[in-house]
Image: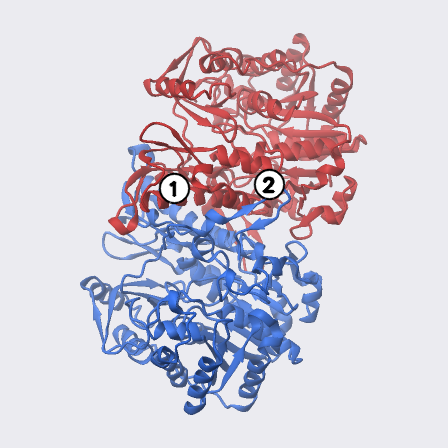
Chain colours: A red, B blue
Amino acid sequence: MTPVSKGTNQAVPSDIEIAQQADKRPITDIAKQLGLQEEDLELYGKYKAKIRLNVWERVAHQPDGRLVLVTAVNPTPAGEGKSTVTVGLGQALNRLEKRAVVALREPSLGPTMGIKGGAAGGGYAQVVPMEDINLHFTGDMHAITSAHNTISALIDNHLHHGNELGIDPRRIVWKRVMDLNDRALRHVVVGLGGKPHGMPREDGFDITVASEIMAILCLAKDLADLKERIGRVVVAYRFDGSPVTVADLGAQGAATLLLKDAVQPNLVQTLENTPALVHGGPFANIAHGCNSLLATKFALKLSEYTVTEAGFGADLGAEKFLHIKSRIGGLQPDVAVIVATVRALKMHGGVPKEGLKTADVNALRRGVVNLERHVETMNKFGVPHVVALNRFPTDTEEELAFLQEWCAQKGIPVALTEVWGKGGAGGEALAQEVIRLAEATEKELRFLYDLDQSVRAKVSAVAREVYGAQDVEYSTQAEKLIREIEAHGWNQLPVCMAKTQYSLSDDPSLLGRPEDFTLHVREVRPALGAGFLVVLTGNMLTMPGLPKKPAALDMDVNRQGRIRGLF
Amino acid sequence: MTPVSKGTNQAVPSDIEIAQQADKRPITDIAKQLGLQEEDLELYGKYKAKIRLNVWERVAHQPDGRLVLVTAVNPTPAGEGKSTVTVGLGQALNRLEKRAVVALREPSLGPTMGIKGGAAGGGYAQVVPMEDINLHFTGDMHAITSAHNTISALIDNHLHHGNELGIDPRRIVWKRVMDLNDRALRHVVVGLGGKPHGMPREDGFDITVASEIMAILCLAKDLADLKERIGRVVVAYRFDGSPVTVADLGAQGAATLLLKDAVQPNLVQTLENTPALVHGGPFANIAHGCNSLLATKFALKLSEYTVTEAGFGADLGAEKFLHIKSRIGGLQPDVAVIVATVRALKMHGGVPKEGLKTADVNALRRGVVNLERHVETMNKFGVPHVVALNRFPTDTEEELAFLQEWCAQKGIPVALTEVWGKGGAGGEALAQEVIRLAEATEKELRFLYDLDQSVRAKVSAVAREVYGAQDVEYSTQAEKLIREIEAHGWNQLPVCMAKTQYSLSDDPSLLGRPEDFTLHVREVRPALGAGFLVVLTGNMLTMPGLPKKPAALDMDVNRQGRIRGLF
């Protein structure tokens, strides 16, 4: 994602132009930097590879490197460039002779075709080959879609052929998935057309990145753990209320088989040849928002610094990185980087997108409270942090100075980054600060809730401590679902909050730092395979829609294979 | 697909065991046999590659090799082993020092998860790596699914955002697709849930292999032709009855971009290191049933003998190979191989599957008429042919002798093949006969209908000359559609018949050589991108269902990655 719209900086060519002119090294050379040989890899062309899982046995005894978690303020339509900073920081650490690896999520075709047109960083801080990464890459998304929908087909087939398990067709909770933004699939009726065509019932499609299979792939420790977790997934309930799992259907073997390649982390590189593990892609608003645990664990073993990103603001991706992924994987970030921009904070201060080119320190003063909340959150978690002030061409010196002084007054480390235009060189100040914090500080990650608290207490902890909510309100439906979860004894799991990314609250229009608001919990879905309870708040949808003019309509490839419309 | 169920021949290990013990050569070595260098390839691991389309410019001036089309009698649940014979014949030709290439279709996950458990040949005549080929392979199926469904999402998005093109929601003919057997998706209602969730309308899912995108990928000459054809696809009609195309939606660029890798032919190898192009996978009962034209054209340029397969019996795959693919691609098969088995012909003679182990020459005598019809068809097309009598362990000498004598009396060349148990060595007699026919005979392909005939006349020609139908009956719906096709001036296209594979008629229970039957045409769908009119007969469905005990339930992969249930 590029931090500015294309026209604003004539000196810098477009992302795809930069990416296609990249001086890429063969991926086998990149692997060698990590101590990996060709037999450790499954090659996908010259510049992409998967790392075989059996490499783990060889590296498991090595000490972990440092872990840097990149997060941000609440995103705005102005663009913040979190992936760009993640990639640029990795490049900068390498320039400072730290062996660094970046760990990112894979893009989904939904937003690529919808509004983003791609998600591999931007400018001179990208992962490449960006066109492959933004399209089918190594097929992980498709494998997840197939595994998920194979389970769906087996459920409806089971109903059709006599329903031996006694599944209540009104209580099938396993929807189908599609890796696209396709609102017309949110609510559907399937099985129409008469007896030969299955049992009619209500159904719906989620986007693939919201699939529990995606979450499982991103949290599994190995192939055996993957299969066990898939087997535990609850897909439906019987007429007597008891749960039906994937294991009950006998489908976990086929689903795992379909994922045997997808579970292996993907290795690519940045524009400056920093190794990059790009693997797994749950969204942070409707899922847990982090790349795979396997990619992070490999990165930690194979480098001195792992720079990884969690999706959207620190209220979403970072909270779930810490409460869910770190808890399951035993991770402890050494430093968090909180990406902020003048533009975003001006929007949080009330400036509309069209007004962003005008300098406005007062708006910044009003909007900086959004950053403040996320800084406080990192303090609560006990994670040392630095604010990365990601510079845009339209920022004025006065505006940048205001933010730097604001940080200085609060005692918050801050560094200006210019990685979009300058690559790793533009991230050296940030890298130095990251190294200083990583090496200097004693850290001890503190969770904001314990697993043995009640579901409501866990939700309340996140709502109050991270979002700043005054209160939490549950729908009748959510209350009923929580009672069921408790009755089944599933209440020991962490919560995976689904909430709009645009606001600290569940109302996307409340920018800045809303106070006195109530968080509305609509639904709670047990995800026993992933190992968490999905808590849906506000109007959050698990299948996005396309805008009136989708990015897809600008895409093209000509006779010679040259691509347009990915950026 | 294996010709016998696993228990019947203890001496031969299972397909996957044989495949996993294969002495595979690096795919770059296989490519070298064809005169291709590493820069001509996009590697997918060590044993799979895509051939870059720009190689065409270098090889286009080379003369074409010989083309061998492998077809069969109407399939039965006994299994005929057509892919196995295709692979074995390629291996045998190589043993006889002819540079041979086999060209096959890619398996679909639908039947793999359903009844087949895989489709890469069997025994000692397989293409490898079979587990990859049977699962995601190089992602072509997934790319087609994504391209198809991106168009679907853009249609519903267009309706949702004001419907500028004036699309009649009752006349959207572009269904969605899924690469699975999933009957519950045949007839669905989408867009439910109220205004934010799209426009409610009837819809349905076809299996991906029935997508017009699949047909286009298999008939396109290059990337530019692919894009033009996609642009021509009719997806809907306006309220005034005029057609709406993919180009009208502006979606052909994005769809082509999603297919830019998928359009490149895949190179793998057989168990005996014969190069194999496995690319594109339309079913022969509901689509045109041949691997991609690009794969066949590359194979012809790069070898002395191209052995290619068309799906199911000669009434389906071969008819469409000759009338559609050969017409579009200017192909002329030198020899056709008609695969027949004692078991299949006994079933055509009325023996149930359970009775196949008992010798029964009388049943053979009754059933051989099925073979006879297909031989006559090849005569009508003017294609020299040989019957490949594919031996099974349960066949008696007497039964085999009967069939050989029957062929001899009719003057039909025949060769016994034992490629399943013996690999290429078991196909040498067939290979010798193929070489003799290819080198000796003058050939001139005759089409059974001309493009400027009426739609009914074309359907009638296939029904009478190939199926042996007495008459053709059209539903009211089909009559209306034909009138529309004529009104739009689309009647110059060839017909792509969709018919059950089990019978020469449209009734799957009529085995042998049915006479005096009427073919029922239910629907006619224009496929302007593919360049044909799909004629649906009988009860043919474009989305299969799963059986009561799907193959998926026996699939597994263990902790070490060893696979079970693919065969």
Q: Residue furthest left?
A: B476
Q: Are marks 1 and 2 on the same chain?
A: yes
- What is the three-letter code of the residue carrying label 2? Val
Image coords of residue A406 (percent x, y): 64, 11
Sort mark 2 into few (<14), some (14-19) or many (20+) by Cα contacts within 10 Å.
many
* Up-down relation of residue A339 to residue B183 (above or below): above
Q: Identify the chain of the residue marked 1, using the numbered disc in the image.
A: A
- What is the three-letter code of the residue carrying label 1? Ile
Q: Which mark is residue A155?
A: 1
Return the disc, 1 or 2, that comes first in the chain's sequence: 1
For the C terminus of chain A, give its image quadrant.
top right
Seen at 75% across and 14% down, the residue is: A441
In which quadrant of the rendered view does residue A327 lie? top right
Q: Is residue B450 left or right of residue B563?
A: left
Seen at 34% across and 53% down, the residue is: B174
Q: Identify the chain of the residue marked 2, using the numbered disc in the image.
A: A
Sort mark 1 into few (<14), some (14-19) or many (20+) by Cα contacts within 10 Å.
many
Q: Mark 1 falls on what kind of element?
A: helix
Q: Is residue B62 left or right of residue A187?
A: right
Image coords of residue A268 (percent x, y): 67, 43
Q: Which mark is residue A558?
A: none
Image coords of residue A124 (percent x, y): 67, 38
Residue labelled with disc 2: A263
Foreground residue among A360 and B524: B524
Q: Nearer the viewer, mark 1 or mark 2?
A: 1
Q: Is residue A35 left or right of residue B134?
A: right
Q: Mark 2 falls on what kind of element?
A: loop
Q: Is residue A178 visible?
A: no
* Up-down relation of residue A334 to residue B249 (above or below): above
Foreground residue among B425 and B151: B425
In which quadrant of the rendered view does residue B560 lie? top right
